[in-house]
Image (cartoon, rainbow, N blue to C red):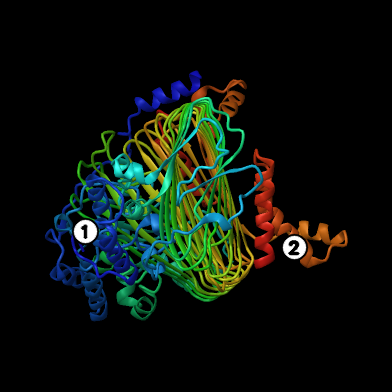
């Protein structure tokens, strides 16, 4: 079968193609944007959504898993949602409203305006044929905001990007440009209710010597399918810490595509995936070290219960020029239920010889010795077990640079356990 | 860091044209015309005197192959193979009838094996080989009760395969006394059709993958081993494969069956002459271990890797799979991969029986323009199954070396255990080392551990060794030997020495 052969579209594929035909005239954008959108959807209609035969989608057979795509704009007011912690300035991605207490040095532009001016056309093009999330988002994107943080700004409070949706479709994009020497904490909330299909792309550039803590909290409803992506580029001596808490959704895929472009760049990722019910959560990361002396540490902790299935794919690529790269990755999983499953694919692709790269992956039960220790101190087994399971994920969230946010994340973990424990 | 710099320099000047098995033997041979068709398959089948069912089985495989596409997921790149430009059958002319003893073997071929260092001729076996006109001396060559003969007496039974034909199998009679069947598979198809029919394709079905289907259609020779219930095979079994003819493909098929409680250790070695064209080797190896049986399969793969420009060399596209069919069965793969232009090989274990065990030990050394994509699959199906993977990759020159492995614990595989360690060592900055593990757990009691590292030779280690007065080259060699030790020690003694030597030769100029 050649690429030109038309495949028989699935229900979800047809729904996407129909939705596109219906909405293309009303979607914001210049004439060139419309062309870019058509190209993006064209790839989906000719090739279809990826199946497990596409290596990048091996564990998330999107074609089979995405059963339906609801109609209509899922835009809803985010008012019902409380900020993750006190003292956070919130930006609503649907209406682009800027809070009165926005820290100095931060500019927010409506995404719609950028689209109308055709300024996003280039960044809308999918990275490669496997970049299905980029393509879907490019085809439909209508909401979002662009953030610019001026060089040297030290934000006195965290920013929160929220887009709490209702039933229907939501397609969001957030281009973020962080200037040199900035210090910033940004919280991204992914939440809503009702049968929804959500795509989102964050396109982040971190300038030289900047230090960014990015916290992603995903708490979608059990009937929401969500495909999101974070692209980032790090400048010289820039540091990005990405904390992710996945605690919801039905079909969820979050891609991280990062490039360490400047010497001395450091990427830290702490990702907790709490998988329950019949959810399928896939975290896929591709990290490129392309210059000398960059470092990266990614720690992923997963708990799978119920009939949930989880995926972590992490690919570290070290280019020939990237000597002295220090790259570490660990993926640890606790399977709590016999009906849950987890698949991990931690990859190393190394072309430079003077590097120290490693990864570890485990799937295990709770350490019997730890359990014994707690029980010997009079803690009943159920409680001891629960403590250990919680500690297993909480410990990597507790060490974040922002205490209030750390605490908020740990309490989200508690909430999840009280619902799924 | 002068040490590193020097190493890199050495790699640059590295000459991979040091393949010492690159000679060609001049013997007259009979070849089937180039190309692949039903007629060629019929011809092969007829040359081998096969029964009708075998021919039908081949044709069925051919049909499947025609409908399949060449896989492209491995991290290797090469020009498209023209499957019509290959001779699918080549046999030295002098054995049209098949040799009855070593003396009937063309002396040129014996010389070849001598050059390869195969213990065909030099051992006492030869004394016992009968002449064509004499009664066999092997029948009465020893009064030893084989069942009591100490295992590993240093004797190895050898089956040697030259292009498409098996030229000699030694110790046949002694093995027969123990009840072990060890013979070329083409002979087994004639003499033990019921066994072959029962097991062939039961681990690697005809349509398993592109190259397995091709092999099933045109396989020419290989070994057949059957170790009956309760028998511990009295000696190591060994096969040497050699591609001699130009433009030929070698399609080896090996089938090893260990019945309840049986044990066998099997060694495989391969070489080919130095040539500018690429030659194809597409083998299928099937292992079957019943209750309490153990099969140990060791390979030293030293096909011609091509010259330093990356010209020529063998394409080694191999499907090897072991089926731990019985409870408490045990299959262990050990491989030392130093040759071939391109290697595509994943010796795997299907851990079907409860408490069964699978092991994979691998050293993959790549230099020049070699490309290796190799690893294993451990499929845990039964309860309490355990697997262990130790993979050591060393890349030098302009080579690419990929470990690709899968550990899968299925829903019912309670208490499955796996330990995986894959370490890569890079020598020089024109090469690549890659690790692609797939870890899949569907059972809550599974305990899987995977660890991978990529680094260069540690400065600290090198400094430590050198400051004790050991020259740099030797120091690097010492460290590399330490790096691969976990795997070397899994090899039978004779092979371990050879393997260490081979690694040395393969990396010559870069690690001494």
- Disc 1 crowd rating (10 Å Cα; few below 14, some 14-19, many 20+) is few
Q: Where residue A190 appears, x then y in whole percent? A: 52, 54
Q: Chain of mark 2?
A: A
Q: Which residue is mark 1?
A: A3
- Disc 2 crowd rating (10 Å Cα; few below 14, some 14-19, many 20+) is many
Do labels 2 and 1 touch, CB within 8 Å? no
- Rendered residue at 22%/61% (across/down): B95
- Tag 2 and tag 1 share a subunit: yes
- Rendered residue at 65%/47% (across/down): A85
The image's mark for residue A28 is: none
Question: Between residues B385 and A69, which one lies in front from this camera angle?
Answer: A69
Q: Where residue B332 appears, x then y in whole percent? A: 51, 60
Q: Where residue A358 appears, x then y in whole percent? A: 54, 42
Residue placed furthest toward the left: B33
Q: Which residue is mark 2?
A: A385
Q: Quadrant of residue A156?
A: top right
Residue B499, can we see it?
A: yes
Question: Between residues A202 and B237, which one lies in front from this camera angle?
Answer: A202
Sequence-wise, which precedes: disc 2 or disc 1? 1
> Which quarter shows the C terminus of chain B?
top left
- Rendered residue at 77%/67% (across/down): A382
Q: Secondary structure at mark 2?
A: helix
Q: Chain of mark 1?
A: A
- Looking at the image, residue A211 sits to the left or right of residue A121; the answer is right
């Amino acid at each position: 079968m050649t690429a030109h052969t038309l495949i028989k579209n699935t229900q979800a594929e047809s729904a996407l193609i129909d939705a596109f035909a219906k909405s293309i005239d009303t979607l914001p954008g210049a004439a060139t944007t419309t062309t870019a959108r058509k190209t993006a959807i064209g790839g989906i209609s000719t090739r279809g959504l990826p199946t497990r035969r596409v290596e990048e989608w091996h564990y998330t057979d999107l074609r089979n898993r995405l059963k339906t795509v609801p109609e209509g704009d899922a835009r809803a007011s985010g008012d019902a949602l409380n900020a993750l912690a006190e003292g956070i300035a919130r930006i609503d991605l649907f209406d682009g409203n800027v809070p009165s207490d926005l820290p100095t040095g931060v500019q927010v532009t409506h995404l719609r305006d950028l689209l109308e001016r055709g300024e996003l056309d280039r960044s809308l093009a999918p990275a490669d044929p496997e970049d299905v999330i980029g393509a879907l988002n490019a085809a439909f994107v209508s909401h979002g905001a662009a953030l610019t943080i001026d060089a040297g700004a030290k934000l006195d409070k965290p920013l929160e990007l929220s887009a709490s949706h209702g039933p229907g479709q939501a397609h969001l994009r957030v281009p973020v440009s962080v200037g040199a020497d900035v210090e910033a904490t940004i919280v991204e909330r992914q939440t809503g209710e009702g049968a929804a299909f959500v795509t989102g792309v964050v396109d982040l550039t971190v300038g030289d010597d900047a230090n960014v803590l990015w916290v992603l909290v995903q708490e979608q409803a059990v009937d929401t399918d969500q495909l999101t992506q974070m692209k980032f580029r790090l400048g010289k001596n820039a540091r990005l810490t990405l904390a992710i808490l996945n605690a919801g959704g039905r079909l969820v895929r979050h891609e991280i595509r990062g490039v360490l472009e400047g010497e001395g760049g450091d990427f830290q990722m702490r990702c907790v995936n709490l998988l329950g019910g019949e959810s399928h959560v896939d975290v896929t990361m591709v990290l490129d070290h392309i210059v000398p002396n960059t470092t990266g540490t990614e720690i992923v902790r997963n708990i799978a219960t119920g009939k949930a299935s989880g995926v972590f794919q992490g690919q570290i690529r070290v280019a020939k020029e990237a000597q002295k790269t220090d790259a570490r990755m660990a993926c640890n999983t606790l399977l709590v239920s016999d009906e849950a499953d987890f698949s991990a694919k931690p990859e190393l692709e190394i072309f430079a010889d003077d590097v120290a790269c490693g990864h570890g992956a485990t799937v295990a039960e709770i350490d019997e010795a730890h359990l014994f220790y707690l029980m010997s101190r009079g803690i009943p087994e159920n409680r001891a077990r629960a403590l250990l399971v919680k500690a297993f994920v909480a410990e990597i969230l507790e060490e974040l640079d922002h205490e209030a946010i750390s605490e908020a994340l740990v309490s989200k973990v508690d909430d999840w356990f009280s619902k799924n424990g | 860091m002068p040490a590193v710099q020097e190493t890199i320099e050495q790699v640059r000047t590295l000459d991979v044209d040091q393949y010492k098995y690159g000679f060609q033997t001049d013997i007259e041979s009979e070849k089937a015309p180039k190309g692949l068709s039903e007629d060629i398959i019929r011809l092969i089948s007829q040359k081998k005197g096969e029964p009708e069912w075998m021919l039908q089985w081949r044709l069925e495989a051919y049909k499947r192959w025609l409908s399949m596409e060449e896989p492209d997921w491995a991290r290797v790149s090469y020009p498209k193979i023209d499957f019509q430009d290959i001779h699918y059958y080549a046999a030295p002319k002098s054995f049209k009838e098949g040799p009855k003893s070593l003396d009937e073997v063309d002396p040129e071929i014996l010389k070849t094996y001598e050059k390869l260092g195969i213990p065909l001729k030099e051992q006492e076996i030869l004394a016992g080989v009968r002449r064509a006109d004499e009664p066999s001396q092997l029948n009465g060559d020893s009064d030893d009760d084989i069942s009591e003969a100490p295992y590993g007496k240093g004797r190895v039974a050898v089956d040697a395969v030259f292009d498409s034909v098996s030229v000699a199998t030694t110790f046949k009679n002694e093995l027969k006394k123990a009840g072990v069947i060890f013979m070329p598979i083409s002979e087994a198809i004639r003499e033990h059709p019921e066994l072959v029919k029962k097991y062939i394709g039961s681990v690697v079905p005809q349509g398993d993958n592109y190259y397995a289907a091709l092999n099933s259609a045109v396989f020419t020779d290989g070994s057949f081993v059957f170790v009956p219930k309760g028998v511990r095979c009295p000696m190591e079994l060994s096969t040497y494969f050699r591609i001699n003819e130009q433009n030929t493909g070698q399609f080896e098929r090996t089938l090893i069956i260990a019945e309840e409680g049986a044990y066998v250790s099997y060694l495989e070695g391969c070489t080919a002459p130095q040539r500018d064209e690429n030659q194809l080797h597409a083998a299928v190896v099937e292992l079957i271990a019943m209750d309490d049986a153990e099969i140990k399969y060791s390979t030293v793969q030293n096909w011609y890797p091509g010259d330093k420009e990356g010209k020529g060399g063998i394409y080694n596209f191999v499907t090897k799979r072991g089926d731990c069919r019985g409870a408490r069965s045990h299959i262990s793969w050990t491989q030392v991969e130093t040759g071939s232009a391109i290697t595509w090989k994943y010796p795997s274990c299907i851990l079907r029986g409860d408490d069964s065990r699978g092991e994979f030990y691998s050293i993959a050394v790549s230099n020049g323009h070699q490309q290796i994509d190799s690893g294993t699959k451990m499929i845990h199906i039964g309860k309490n199954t355990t697997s262990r993977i130790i993979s050591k990759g060393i890349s030098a020159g302009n080579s690419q070396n990929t470990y690709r492995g899968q550990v899968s614990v299925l829903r019912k595989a309670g208490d499955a255990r796996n330990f995986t360690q894959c370490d890569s060592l890079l020598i020089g900055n024109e090469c690549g080392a890659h690790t692609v593990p797939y870890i899949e757990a569907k059972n809550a009691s599974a305990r899987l551990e995977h660890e991978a590292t990529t680094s260069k030779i540690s400065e600290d280690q090198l400094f430590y060794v050198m400051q004790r007065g050991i020259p740099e080259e030797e120091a690097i060699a010492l460290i590399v030997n330490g790096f691969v030790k976990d795997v070397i020690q899994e090899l039978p003694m004779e092979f371990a020495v050879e393997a260490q030597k081979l690694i040395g030769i393969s990396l010559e100029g870069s690690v001494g």
